[in-house]
Image (cartoon, rainbow, N blue to C red):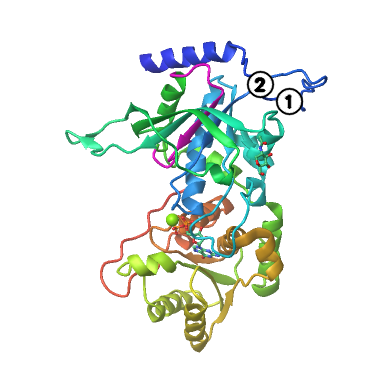
Amino acid sequence: MLILSVIVTNLVIAAAEQDTSAQYCDKATKSCGNGDEVSYDKKLIFYDVNPPEGFNLRRDVYMRFAIMLAEAQKQGKDNWELVLPPWYNLYHWRSGRRDPTPWNKYFDIKSLKSYSPVVEMYEIFSKTKKKQLEIDVLYMLENYEDPFENGVFNDKWEVQGSCEYEGLYWGYNNITAKEVLCVKFQGKISKLWELIALHPHATKIMFTHGEIPLHDTYGTKSYWDCRKSMKFNKNLVRIAKDYIEQYLNCKTNKCATYLSVHWRRQDFARSRGNQVPSIAGTAKQIRKTMKKLPNINKVFIATDASMSEINKLEKALNEYGYETHFFLPSPSIIEEYGDGGIAIIDQIISSHAAHFIGTHESTFTYRIQEEREILGFDSSTTFNRLCPDTGHCERSTKWLIVN
Ligand SMILES: Nc1nc2c(ncn2[C@@H]2O[C@H](COP(=O)(O)OP(=O)(O)O)[C@@H](O)[C@H]2O)c(=O)[nH]1
Ligand SMILES: *[C@@H]1O[C@H](CO)[C@@H](O)[C@H](O)[C@H]1NC(C)=O
Ligand SMILES: [Mg+2]
């Protein structure tokens, strides 16, 4: 507590100091009028995530940083902004290479900003006078080899010394870092303020491996306030709602007309074979649930399965007599939104179903479950999972909303 308050004091002092690097000019405040070199009045936090991590874990990492900044802001530390890391080269997004994609393609930025001081990379670029964007300090976070030293997990960090960044800077070749430091880190994300305080004059700080710091508290009101602000881009919502109306016969938020299933395949089917069902096993489990929903005959499947797997499941469900739907995007939707947008549309459609069955330990499923909590569905319709064909089937954990 004492240490923290010292740090907070340091930060306040640091904030009061003028930034002399003068790389920014703020159009909004018109402080750029006659070409004077005027500083952007906010300090910036950048982060990236372990490259193989998917979209939905990245959404959780975002929440950790967004909450960290929102909480700091509540305590009067309002001179920091979080730069939204453009989406680039995601492992699961295979339908063609795309340029680094801003967050507004997928999310409602106004809504994100209503919770936390966030800014898009292109907004920062547009205020950068130099040809390069220079990060002052880049902290490369690393796990401790033994997180449970003497049997206990303590929050801690340790600067290891300077090292080399070999990452991609979100796909940009005009970003550099003046200083790169390797840091062993474990524990709550708010401890990053201690690292930040080591460089009180730095105005642009970046963290790699943003997935290493943990939520200060998981599932609390701040968590849900942040989560609620993560609204999707309105166009994606409209596409999903049009689909629901046209094919699933529902015009309201809480639909009574269909069951939805998140059927995660690909790497899950390959490397977690004992946790996910076979195709025939999936169809059987869907039938078992459908028997308890006598008024419903429509099934919506969100999936990353191959076309041949999709056809097999569809055939099995049709044989049981169910009307089966998959969202098949038009070429123009693929072109405009890519795999990321299609995945979001699948999530939105799944969120509105009368009843949902997810895939165990999939963050894609978790985000759908949260959406359903926000929509106000009974938790018994939400926290359900596909079980393996044989063996033990652990129940889904219920992460209930806190309003
Ligand atoms: N369109 C679509 N894509 C999916 C679906 N399930 C998984 N994916 C893709 O696979 C990725 C899985 O990574 P991630 O989001 O981290 O979720 P997790 O790996 O299931 O925890 C997603 O981001 C999507 O790109 C699905 O039901 N529909
Ligand atoms: C860096 O490159 C990107 C992509 O070409 C461009 O949009 C951006 O404005 C550039 N940034 C700076 C600071 O010049
Ligand atoms: Mg993943």
Q: Position of residue 210 (x, y in %)?
A: 45, 39
Q: Position of residue 163 (x, y in %)?
A: 39, 32
For disc 2, the marked residue is 41
Type of amino acid under label 2: Asp
Q: Residue at x 52, y 31 (%)?
A: 177
Query: Going by the image, does 332 lie left or right of 161?
Result: right
- Tag of residue 85: none
Q: Position of residue 266 (x, y in %)?
A: 43, 68
Res 117 seen here = no
The local secondary structure at tag 1 comes to: loop
Check contact, mark 2 vs mark 1: CB within 8 A.
yes
Type of amino acid under label 1: Asp
Q: Which residues are magenta?
A: 198-212
Q: Residue at x 23, y 38 (%)?
A: 146
Please determine whether, in this image, residue 75 is positioned above or below residue 266: above
Q: Residue furthest bottom?
A: 319
